[in-house]
């Protein structure tokens, strides 16, 4: 695990954008794994700016997101599809038919849909670079603590801590999903590179457990210790317990 500590969150985003730009500019038909949450928003802003400056094009890129809520459709502004459209896809030259999220249609076998997502990733050639954030409880994607380190794309129930942490994003009378379809930990580990971004004091404990703690399902992000190309970009606050 390569841990790089920056002065502030803006520098974390800028560095992450350089990694993405290098992949997209060098590789033909690059496959990018994407994340949601507040942390990567500044990365997506930096990528949009690079695109506007003519430094990066997405027209050959395929993307796979880590996760998507269940129980809301993609028009809902809380869906991760909506998040991706608003923060990245609507502002760059990506072909939206090549952008995928692990949706789960009601009435169809969820396990089959999870495995179909895995197949889609494999058929695209696998993920070259997976962007990750980290939950305050150490989750990656929506792989909550105790998720199997061998897990594949499937439905997960969100933990109370995650629901509490994310409740700030929902209005008081708005439906907050308690289930999500998420790539598994093994799916994430299959990516050729993983790039985890963490900023702010409230991530310091999770970062400590991920980097210096035991490899354990109690901290799903600790699985990245097993990855040969895991890059962790931190600001000083997120690194404060290392
Ligand atoms: C959600 C997402 C994760 C993300 C985490 C942290 O639960 N499923 O992919 O890493 O939140 O989000 P934030 O960056 O807002 O702290």
Image (cartoon, helix red, strand yellow):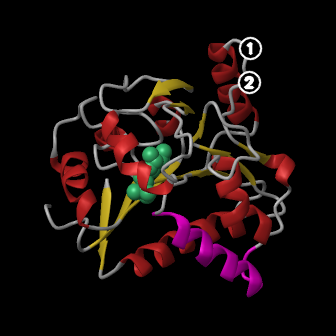
Residue visible at 68% across and 26% down? 104
Asked if the stretch drawn in magenta spans residue 44, the answer is: yes
The residue beneath circle 2 is 105
Residue visible at 42% across and 33% down? 143
Can residue 210 be spotted in the picture? Answer: yes
Look at the picture and state if 18 lies above or below 133. below
**10 Å neighbourhood of mark 1: few (<14), some, or many (≥20)?**
few
Query: Element type at marker 2?
Result: loop
Depth check: give the residue in front, 134 or 1. Answer: 134
Look at the picture and state if 58 lies above or below 67. below
Look at the picture and state if 221 lies above or below 58. above
**10 Å neighbourhood of mark 2: few (<14), some, or many (≥20)?**
few
Residue visible at 36% across and 50% down? 165
The answer to whether marks 1 and 2 mark residues whose Cβ atoms lie closer than 8 Å is: yes
Residue 103 is situated, as x and y percent measured from the top left of the image, at: 69, 32
Which secondary structure dominates the residues rendered in magenta?
Answer: helix
Asked if the stretch drawn in magenta spans residue 101, the answer is: no
């Amino acid at each position: 695990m390569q841990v790089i500590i920056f002065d502030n969150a803006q520098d974390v985003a800028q560095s992450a954008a350089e990694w993405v730009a290098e992949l997209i500019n060098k590789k033909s038909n690059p496959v990018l794994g994407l994340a949601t949450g507040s942390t990567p928003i500044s990365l997506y802003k930096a990528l949009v700016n690079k695109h506007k400056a003519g430094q990066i094009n997405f027209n050959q890129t395929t993307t796979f997101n880590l996760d998507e809520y269940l129980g809301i459709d993609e028009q809902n502004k809380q869906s991760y599809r909506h998040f991706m459209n608003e923060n990245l896809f609507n502002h760059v030259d990506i072909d939206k038919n090549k952008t995928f999220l692990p949706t789960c249609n009601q009435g169809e076998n969820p396990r089959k849909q999870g495995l179909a997502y895995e197949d889609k990733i494999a058929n695209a050639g696998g993920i070259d670079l997976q962007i990750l954030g980290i939950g305050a409880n150490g989750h990656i994607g929506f792989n909550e603590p105790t998720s199997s380190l061998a897990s594949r794309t499937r439905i997960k129930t969100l933990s109370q801590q995650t629901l509490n942490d994310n409740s700030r994003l929902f209005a008081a009378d708005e439906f907050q999903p308690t289930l999500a379809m998420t790539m598994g930990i093994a799916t994430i580990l299959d990516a050729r590179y993983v790039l985890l971004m963490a900023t702010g004091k409230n991530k310091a404990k999770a970062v400590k457990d991920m980097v210096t703690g035991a490899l354990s399902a109690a901290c799903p992000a600790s699985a990245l210790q097993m990855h040969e190309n895991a890059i962790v970009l931190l600001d000083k606050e997120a690194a404060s317990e290392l």
